Amino acid sequence: MPYILEKKFPLTHQFYVNKEEDFPSFSIDRYRVIVEEAQDIIYEIDPSGYFTFVNRKAVEILGYTISELLSKHFHELIREDYRENVALFYSYQIEAKEKSSYLEFPVLTKDGRTEWVGQKVQLNYRNDVLKGAIVVARIRTERHNLEYGLKLSEEKYRGILENLQFGLMEVDLDERILYVNDTMTRITGFSKEELLGNIASDLLVRAQTKEKIEEQHKLREKGKASAYEVEIIRKDGTSFFGLISGAPTYDITGKRTGSIGVHVDITERKRNEMELQQVKADLDRYTGGLEDLNKITSDNSLTLQQQLRTGLEIVSKYFEMPMGGVVKAVGEDLIVIENLFNVGVPEEFQKKLPLHGSVSGLAFLEDRLIAIPDLANSEYADYSTIQRIGLNCMLSMPIYVNNKKYGAILLGCIGGTRKNFSEYDLQFFSLFARYVGYVLTSAENTQTLFEQQEELLSQNQKLEESQEFLSSINSFVTQLLEQEDIQSISWEIAENLINKFGFIDCVIYVLNEEKGCLEQLAAFGPKDAGERKIKDPIEVPLGKGVVGSVAMTGLAEIIPNTLKDPRYIADDEVRLSEITVPIVFENRVIGVIDSEHPEEDFFNEKHLKTLTIIANLAAGRLKSAKSKRRQEKAEKELRESENRLKTVINSALDAIITIDAEGKITGWNPRATQIFGWSQEEVMGHHLTENIIPTQHRKAHFEGMRHYMATGVGPVLNQRIEITAMHKSGHEFPIELSIIPMITNGVHSFTAFARDITFQKNSQDEMEKSLAKERELNELKSRFVAMTSHEFRTPLTTIKQNVDLIEYSLEAKFPELLPSFGTYLGRISSEISRVTSLMNDMLLLGKIEAGKVEISKKPVDLVALAQQLIQRITTGRADGRTIELKIIGVKKTVPVDATLMDHILGNLLSNALKYSEGKPNPILTFSFDQLSQIRISVKDFGIGIPKKDQKGLFSSFYRATNVKNIQGTGLGLSIVREFVLMHGGTISVESDTNQGSEFILIMPMA
């Protein structure tokens, strides 16, 4: 207001202050006494908005002195965020010429506090001219804060109600809907407009549910809250089960105004409860059925046939399916062995059913349970048995007797369909199928038992005769269990058992898997040297002799006459009969029991049975003993290996450090002490960062450890890196480091191999300097070779031209002298060509060494290139020799530089012809039989290359010692090798003196 006043009435402050004629007509003194004692702030302002009077209450509340306030503009005290609104309000009052107004807004005290005031402003007009305003302001801070808090609380709880995940609805005493939240509209499908004002029970529940609603209203009348379940109808006609928690509502006088209820959709829970009730009912019926079956199985008065019949009746009653039976599969039919209720069943189906074309037959053939509540709408509706009998529902599954598929059981009903079979129904039917199998198995076994009893009676006498044998076996087993090692077990077999059965000789062999032979470990008879030592023990290879053959086949043998068996090997003496039994454990032969007798045809089946039993009893103990011996050997080797490993670690030239997953040191070898200066006792159990990792690398170390433990990936693991380490003295030095992660029994650890490379780094610096000098020398050499070649080429060209001119002049002027001088001129030309070729090779080699020869690979038909090259090399030869070309596999293009490849093959083919004068034609072979590479072979039948010369064959200027007067520079093969290497290939030679030579190139196909 003040600055609005200022705009409308631009009067000065001095004009208005202390003008007594502007005050009302009553006494100024009385006015001031009343104002000064007032409990409200009372002040006056002039039209420009400046204070002209303030009372003591204003000074007390605002904190300013009277003089400070009288110098202020009114709007300075209004909180900034309200100044514009207050100004608009009082601007409107002035424009409307409303003499009195009331407004609440915040003001700021001198110490910065906010006080809310309720201010009444009375405009003072004189002769229709605004002279100022008289203001009475009352402090409303406490009331404002209370009202503001209530407003926030109301907004908060309204937001909660609107966003509540449960439906909320309020109704009056007539059940007319007064309020619903958004969730209520969502779960019912009605909009708020469609719900508000309507009777809740008329709109949202069925008629039969209203009675329940009325009962709840009676509880509300008594002031009681409750929770209840009802079916609620949605707008689209569907429904859901809702749990309603309702309570009465009251007005401020305590009078009940209606009810409010929270609605929760419990459809899923209700469905689960109904399903649970159904499962409980099925389970109770299942339990009752089992109890009924259990009664007949425990009733010893019932015959097996009666048990089968009674069981069918129980199951028929359980399923309410009157037709039932048990059938046995015989050929293409199912023979009925027990049935119920044949009324309406065709006679032909009363005794048997077809295996194919019946549900029971299908259950038997496919070995599965078939449950069909509605046969008319099933895939089996067309079966003749279904149509002719008129079955509407059916159950069938196979039955087993003595673990063999026997037949099937079936249940059926005529007229009407039934609900789906529950899981308990199917389980009960499966148990009944097992029960039927058990009954039939018992019947079959009873007959078998009777037959076996007769057989046992006949065998009793034989068993009595074997009593002594069994006693001996029992004694043997008892003593055998006390033996631990292979020798003791073997001697126990030989000494304490074999002699009890009348044998005069027996040798126990044990398989030595490492040697692949059988070793004699124990003996009874002539081979027994006493003190459990065997006389002249031998080893029998597998497959050799009768013993070796039995060990190979695993089959026992009786040899009635050893003289007629070529496999027989006499050990200490020749005996006429032999019995050999393998000792088998887990289908593997681990030893052999062998016995001989001087009489022919001495051993019989009883002996074989006896030795087989002994072998079987001994097999497990021998295997255990062998395993124990291997274990002891392995443990010994492990200890030795650990000792060797410890020795290697302690003697290693590298520092070997082991840390755990937390980065603590668990291993520290002597070399680590030498390299880093820390003793093992000083570092064990401490973090690696405390000892050898410099400060600048510690953060990376911790982050790398965390990353590996989280992801299993470490960028510096399993590779060699160069890094600096810290010595105990504090100085850093370069090391070569390799870190290998390990997981043992789920526990992570890391082993680091560190090597001090201070000397190597220093040497490397020196080496790099030497290499720089070497490169300078090579560059100088290349320039020298190029210059020399160029300088030689010019005079050689001049000489060649002059020789040609001399030859031309002789032929033109003195033709009779040409034959005399032609030989000399030809020799000069030949030597010029040799020197030119040498210069060209030297220049080319210099370019290669300087890295100035570039390679450009493209797919090339090497066969076509070779054919052109052969024609060029061999055309016009006086001896008519050529190069034979062979191709292996399917010809294909090869990625090579055609120019360089022409030089490679040209050199090798020219050499092949040059060093095999008078011999068969050389052979060039291309082998395309591998996908990743091609093999090229150049083979001649000439003078060959001595073995001693082959090592330096591809070096520059090197020639074999047997070339004699054959011309050559010694540069060709070195250039060929460089070109092959540029292709990523290899070249090798196979040769010897006067054996010819074969150069083999392997070139990559990519």
Image (tube, rainbow, N blue to C red):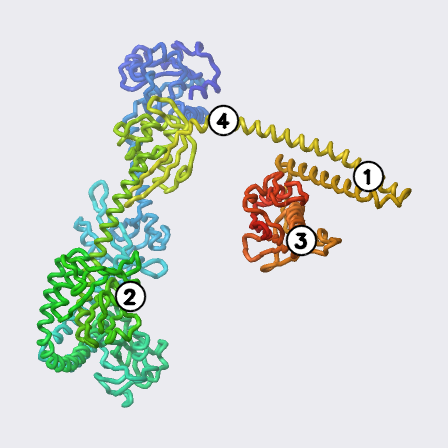
Kindly identify which residue carries mark 3: 866
Q: Earlier in the sequence, mark 3 or mark 4?
A: 4
Q: Amino acid at mark 2?
A: Gly
Q: Earlier in the sequence, mark 4 or mark 2?
A: 2
Q: Residue at x 65, y 55 (%)?
A: 919
Marks 1 and 3, how far apart at CA: 35 Å
Q: Residues within 10 Å of mark 4 (few under 14, many from 20)?
A: few
The quadrant the N terminus occupies is: top left
Place of residue 25 in the rendered image (x, y in percent of width and height, measured from the top left): 36, 14
Kindly identify which residue carries mark 2: 548
Between disc 3 and disc 4, the foreground one is 3
Q: Amino acid at mark 4?
A: Asp
Mark sitting on residue 149? none
Q: Earlier in the sequence, mark 3 or mark 2?
A: 2
- SS at badge 4: helix
Q: Amino acid at mark 1?
A: Val
